[in-house]
């Protein structure tokens, strides 16, 4: 089983997670920019965060055999903070970078006018930069938020296949299916969606435009939920090819629209799901820093 | 690196991209990061080799990589087309560096030398429409020299630093190269700029290594050889 986790916040996770993910078959991820639990106090904090997403985190993932991509945006929650609004001014510089595969997460948190204005700006930026869009749907008033999301997408003129509407459940999947947008499901230990409900949705609606992610972050979550969903699909009678389509080919097709995926072409990875993670190279460094401690090679010798 | 400006005519950047930046130089902020997707990336094949990469220089410490050359050419084209005054040139260059990832920062560092002598000849003023950068690039050099990234250290020590970096900072930078394994060959003009004080610092460093039972890097010996001391 090879897995592309299309939504996971690895900056919040440990190297143990990277090793376990690799062992479970994860070979690529996309890390959407989002809020950090602790509110930021200004745009400089976002710059450091975005720099880490295109820099250090990509390096860290690579040390464990995983290709790391990211999406960049001013997240819906902090779109409401006027102190953070200047982030919009420098988003274009980041949206131009390699490995940035979508604008996101954008969308609604509390359904405010500010969130809507920033969401519209993001849709325009996606058009300008030829990028897909990753849309977060709200925890509260989800159905209304999803409906308004789809109205804004339609009004933007972006083709629906460039938009992934995430965190769906049984009550919101139908309207997104009808819109032509991609459907994202975050498989969590308790909330949002679990792997068994997910399998039922796949059985009812088919695999077209279906995206499964762990959305693992700093909260209670599980970076192996993508693999668990694959196992649940097998038990429910889906074929290996079905599992590969949902967990690899679909996210590759969606983010591939950016033209900026950092994947090796061709050969399926036959070790996926069976091999332990590679050991970090003792000589590899990012800006002179390594993921190891106390074992720096003596470069001057 | 040679430090020479990119050749005119068929160069490292596709003509359409050059035309785009000349028509709208203020778009350099989004064209500069994206350039490798159009112009390609990787080590430049040495003239005397058939294989695509130089195995001796995979990180482009000795010679700018394909994407470095393309970014330098793009920034020069923007600066010349926009006829930016020196202050604006400094501002745009600093923003590209500050918002850049390591690859983009490295390219900005490589661009400092040609931006400082836009007509290709040091010290003889600028061609119409482009003012020389002057000392405005020194804060970027200083930032790169604070990192431990060999790619940035090497790029920071090109002809611009050889010409403009004050001696104490330049000596510290050369010493840092010895510590971090950046080859001396990457330091532009080191033979001309090395002085007695640098030799003293390197001699102390060599003595420290010998006291610890460790080897002295050949590059340290090359510096010391320029300043033979009576025993």
Image: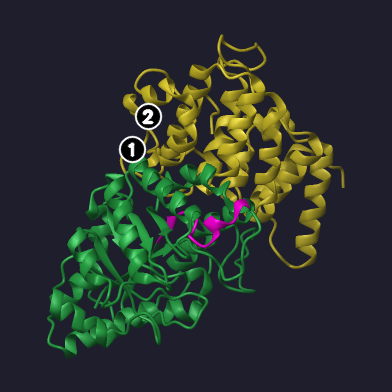
Residues under labels 1 and 2: Cα distance?
Answer: 8 Å
User: Residue drawn 49% across and 67% down?
Assistant: A60
- SS for callout 1: helix
- Residue B207 visible from this viewpoint: yes
**Which of the chains bears the disc numbered 1?**
B
- Residue B43 falls in which quadrant of the image? top left
Q: Dot 1: within a 10 Å radius of its alpha carbon, few (fewer than 14), some, or many (20 or more) residues?
A: few
- Color style of the picture: by chain
Which residue corresponds to mark 2? Answer: B13
User: Residue drawn 49% across and 31% down?
Assistant: B72
The one nearer the camera, A91 or A146, is: A146
Q: Dot 2: within a 10 Å radius of its alpha carbon, few (fewer than 14), some, or many (20 or more) residues?
A: many
Would you place residue A283 above or below residue A22 in this image? above
Q: Are marks 1 and 2 in contact (CB under 8 Å)?
A: yes
Percent of width and height locating residue B183: 60, 46
Furthest residue toward bottom: A235
User: Where does the magenta region start and end?
Assistant: A69-82
Q: Earlier in the sequence, mark 1 or mark 2?
A: 2
- SS for callout 2: loop
**Chain that is coloured yellow in the picture:** B
Percent of width and height locating residue B88: 62, 25
**Which of the chains bears the disc numbered 2?**
B
């Amino acid at each position: 089983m090879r897995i592309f986790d299309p939504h996971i916040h690895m900056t919040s996770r440990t190297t143990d997670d990277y090793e376990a993910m690799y062992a479970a078959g994860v070979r690529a991820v996309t890390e959407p920019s989002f809020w950090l639990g602790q509110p930021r106090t200004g745009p400089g904090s976002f710059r450091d965060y975005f720099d880490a997403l295109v820099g250090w985190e990509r390096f860290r993932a690579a040390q464990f055999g995983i290709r790391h991509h990211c999406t960049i945006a001013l997240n819906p929650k902090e779109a409401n903070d006027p102190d953070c609004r200047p982030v919009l001014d420098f988003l274009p510089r980041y949206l131009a970078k390699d490995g940035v595969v979508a604008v996101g997460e954008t969308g609604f948190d509390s359904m405010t006018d500010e969130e809507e204005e920033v969401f519209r700006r993001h849709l325009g930026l996606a058009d300008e930069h030829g990028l897909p869009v990753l849309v977060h749907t709200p925890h509260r008033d989800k159905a209304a938020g999803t409906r308004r999301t789809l109205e804004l997408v339609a009004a933007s003129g972006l083709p629906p296949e460039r938009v992934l509407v995430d965190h769906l459940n049984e009550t919101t999947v139908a309207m997104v299916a009808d819109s032509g947008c991609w459907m994202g499901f975050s498989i969590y230990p308790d909330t949002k969606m679990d792997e068994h409900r997910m399998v039922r949705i796949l059985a009812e609606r088919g695999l077209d435009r279906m995206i499964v992610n762990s959305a693992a972050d700093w909260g209670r979550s599980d970076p192996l939920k993508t693999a668990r969903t694959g196992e649940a699909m097998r038990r429910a009678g889906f074929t290996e090819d079905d599992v590969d389509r949902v967990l690899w080919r679909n996210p590759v097709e969606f983010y591939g629209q950016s033209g900026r995926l950092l994947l090796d072409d061709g050969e399926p990875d036959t070790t996926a799901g069976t091999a332990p993670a590679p050991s970090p190279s003792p000589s590899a460094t990012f800006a002179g820093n390594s993921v190891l401690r106390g074992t720096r090679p003596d470069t001057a010798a | 690196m040679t430090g020479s400006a990119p050749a005119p005519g068929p160069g490292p950047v596709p003509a359409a991209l050059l035309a785009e930046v000349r028509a709208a130089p203020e778009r350099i902020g989004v064209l500069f990061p994206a350039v490798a997707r159009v112009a390609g990336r990787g080590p430049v094949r040495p003239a005397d080799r058939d294989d695509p990469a130089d195995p001796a220089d995979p990180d482009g410490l000795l010679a700018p990589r394909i994407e470095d050359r393309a970014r330098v050419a793009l920034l020069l084209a923007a600066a010349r087309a926009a006829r930016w005054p020196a202050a604006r040139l400094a501002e745009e260059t600093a923003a590209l560096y500050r918002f850049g990832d390591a690859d983009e920062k490295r390219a900005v560092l490589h661009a400092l030398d040609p931006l400082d002598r836009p007509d290709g000849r040091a010290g003889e003023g600028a061609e119409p429409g482009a003012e020389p950068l002057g000392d405005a690039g020194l804060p970027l050099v200083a930032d790169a020299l604070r990192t431990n990234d060999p790619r940035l250290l090497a790029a920071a020590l090109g002809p611009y630093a050889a010409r403009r970096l004050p001696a104490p900072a330049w000596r510290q930078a050369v010493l840092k190269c010895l510590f971090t394994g950046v080859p001396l060959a990457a330091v532009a003009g080191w033979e001309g700029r090395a002085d007695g004080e640098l030799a003293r610092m390197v001699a102390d460093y060599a003595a420290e290594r010998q006291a610890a039972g460790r080897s002295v890097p050949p590059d340290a010996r090359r510096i010391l050889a320029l300043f033979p001391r009576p025993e």
